[in-house]
C-alpha cells in the first residue's frame, strides 16, 4: 500500500521567516552560479584558448564529481540532525573556490590545469550541498506546502538562468572574464549569511535509522524499476543529445557564428525564458490532456530545438537558430522533466522519494557525461557543425517514435508503478 508523507512541521504560516531566508539564499547562489555557467566556458575559450577535447574534460569535471558523490552524500545526509551549519560552511568553501579563479588570473597563473581542478572541486562541493538542501526544505516547510515551496525555488532558478548569463555577458563587455567570476564568489558569501537565519528541528533518531536500513537493496531495486520506464529512457536520450552540444556550444557560437560575449550571454539567457514558460504551462497542459500527451508535446518541442542549428550561418539566420535552440530545448525539456518526475514522485512509497530522485538524477547525469564525451570526440574528428548535426539526428531517431507512442496511449499516473515487477507509466 502506498502511504503519504507524514507532516513533520506544524508551522502555522507559509512562507515563514525560515523559508524566506532559505529561498533567498538559494536564489542568490543560483544567480551567481548562472553567471559562472556562461563565464567559465568563455574563460576557457577566450582566455586560455581551450581545444574541443579540453572543453569536453571541463564539462565532464563540472558534472562527474557531483554525480559520483550524490548517492553516498544523500545517505550520509540522512544520518545528520543539523544540516544548516554544514550548508553555511560549504557556501563559504564555494566562495573561496570561485574567488581563486580571478586571483590566479591576476597573478598570471590561470592556465587550463588549475581551472579544471577548481571546476572539479566546486562540483564535488555542490554534490554535498545538494544532498543537504532537500532534507532542509522538508524540515522547514509543512507537508501541504512542499509543492508550493518547490515551485517557488524552481521559479527563482529560472529567473536566475535568465538574468545570470545576460549579466555575465554584459560584465564581460567591460571586465576581463575571470573578474566576472567574483560575482559568483560574492553570491555564495551572501547565501551563507542568509542560511544562518534558517532554523530546523532535529530529525528523530528512529526515523533516521528506518531511512538508512536496507539502502543498497532498495537502490538496486529502484534503479531497475526506473531503467524500465520509457519516460526516464527518453530523458536520458535527451540529456545525451544535449550533452553532445554542451562542450561545443561556446566554440560553435564563437567560431562558426562569430558571436561576441555580450551576444552569447543574451542569447543563452533565452533558454531560461523557455524554462519559465514550460514550468508555468505544464500543470495546465496535464490537467487538460493528461500526462501522456503532455510528455509527447514536451518531447516534440525538444526534438525541434536542434533542427535549424546545423544549417545556421553567421548573421540573422544564425541568431534565429540559436534562439530556437535555447527556447525550444529549455521549454520542451522542462515539460518533460516536470511530467516524468511528477509521476515518479506520485508513484513512490513513503521513505523512497529521496532515493528515487537521486537515482533519476544520476541517470540523467550519466547521460550528460556520455554525451559530453561523444561531443568532444566527434568535434575533434569531424568538426563542430557535423557534431551538431549528429545531436539533432540522435534526437529525431530516439525521441520521435516515443512522441507517437505517448500521444496515442494517453497513459495515466499509476501509484504502484515503482513496486517490484510492476512497471506502468512513463
Image (cartoon, rainbow, N blue to C red):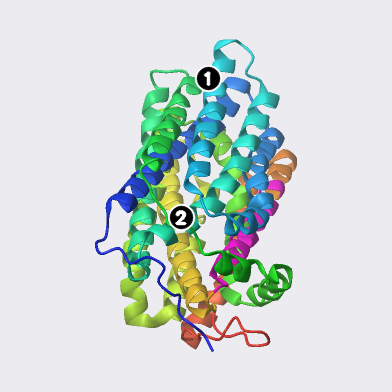
Residue hosting label 2 = 136
- Identify the secondary structure beneath mark 2: helix
From this view, report whether residue 42 is shown above or below residue 290.
Answer: above
Q: Where's residue 123, x and y in %? A: 61, 41
The crowd level at tag 1 (other Cα within 10 Å; few <14, some 14-19, many 20+) is: some
Q: Observer-nearest residue: 208 or 62?
A: 208
Q: CA distance from mark 2 to mark 1?
A: 32 Å
Does residue 409 appear to the left or right of 187 in the view shown?
right
User: Residue at 36% across / 27% down in the picture?
Assistant: 170
Task: Decide: is 331 above or below 38.
Answer: below
Q: Which residue is mark 1?
A: 102
**Left or right of 280, for residue 216:** right
Left or right of 48 in this view: 329? left
Q: Residue at x 57, y 54 (%)?
A: 80
Q: Name the foreground residue: 159 vs 82.
A: 82
Residue 264, image x, y percentages: 44, 35
Which image quarter: residue 111?
A: top right
Amino acid at each position: 500500500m502506498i502511504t503519504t508523507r507524514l507532516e513533520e512541521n506544524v508551522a502555522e504560516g507559509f512562507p515563514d521567516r525560515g523559508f524566506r531566508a532559505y529561498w533567498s539564499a538559494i536564489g542568490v547562489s543560483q544567480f551567481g552560479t548562472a553567471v559562472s555557467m556562461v563565464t567559465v566556458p568563455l574563460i576557457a575559450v577566450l582566455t586560455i584558448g581551450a581545444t574541443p577535447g579540453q572543453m569536453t574534460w571541463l564539462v565532464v569535471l563540472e558534472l562527474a564529481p557531483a554525480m559520483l558523490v550524490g548517492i553516498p552524500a544523500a545517505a550520509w545526509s540522512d544520518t545528520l540532525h543539523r544540516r544548516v551549519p554544514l550548508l553555511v560552511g560549504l557556501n563559504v568553501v564555494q566562495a573561496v573556490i570561485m574567488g581563486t579563479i580571478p586571483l590566479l588570473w591576476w597573478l598570471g597563473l590561470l592556465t587550463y590545469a588549475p581551472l579544471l581542478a577548481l571546476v572539479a572541486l566546486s562540483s564535488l562541493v555542490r554534490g554535498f550541498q545538494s544532498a543537504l538542501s532537500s532534507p532542509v526544505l522538508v524540515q522547514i516547510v509543512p507537508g501541504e506546502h512542499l509543492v508550493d515551496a518547490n515551485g517557488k525555488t524552481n521559479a527563482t532558478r529560472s529567473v536566475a538562468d535568465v538574468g545570470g548569463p545576460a549579466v555575465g555577458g554584459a560584465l564581460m563587455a567591460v571586465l576581463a572574464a575571470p573578474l566576472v567570476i567574483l560575482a559568483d564568489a560574492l553570491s555564495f558569501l551572501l547565501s551563507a549569511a542568509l542560511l544562518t537565519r534558517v532554523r530546523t528541528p532535529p530529525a528523530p533518531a528512529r526515523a533516521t535509522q528506518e531511512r538508512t536500513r536496507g539502502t543498497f537493496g532498495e537502490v538496486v531495486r529502484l534503479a531497475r524499476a526506473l531503467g524500465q520506464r520509457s519516460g526516464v529512457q527518453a530523458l536520458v536520450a535527451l540529456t545525451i543529445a544535449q550533452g553532445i552540444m554542451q562542450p561545443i556550444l561556446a566554440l560553435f557560437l564563437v567560431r562558426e557564428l562569430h558571436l561576441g560575449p555580450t551576444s552569447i550571454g543574451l542569447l543563452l539567457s533565452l533558454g531560461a525564458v523557455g524554462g519559465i514558460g514550460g514550468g508555468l504551462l505544464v500543470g495546465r497542459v496535464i490537467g487538460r490532456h493528461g500526462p501522456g500527451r503532455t510528455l509527447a508535446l514536451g518531447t516534440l518541442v525538444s526534438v525541434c530545438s536542434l533542427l535549424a542549428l546545423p544549417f545556421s550561418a553567421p548573421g540573422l539566420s544564425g541568431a534565429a537558430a540559436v534562439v530556437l535552440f535555447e527556447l525550444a530545448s529549455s521549454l520542451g525539456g522542462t515539460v518533460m522533466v516536470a511530467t516524468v518526475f511528477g509521476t515518479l514522485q506520485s508513484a513512490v512509497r513513503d521513505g523512497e522519494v529521496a532515493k528515487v530522485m537521486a537515482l533519476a538524477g544520476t541517470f540523467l547525469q550519466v547521460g550528460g557525461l556520455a554525451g559530453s564525451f561523444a561531443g568532444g570526440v566527434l568535434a575533434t574528428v569531424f568538426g563542430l557543425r557535423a557534431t551538431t548535426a549528429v545531436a539533432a539526428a540522435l534526437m529525431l531517431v530516439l525521441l520521435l517514435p516515443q512522441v507517437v507512442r505517448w500521444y496515442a496511449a494517453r497513459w495515466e499516473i499509476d501509484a504502484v508503478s515503482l513496486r517490484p515487477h510492476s512497471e506502468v507509466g512513463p
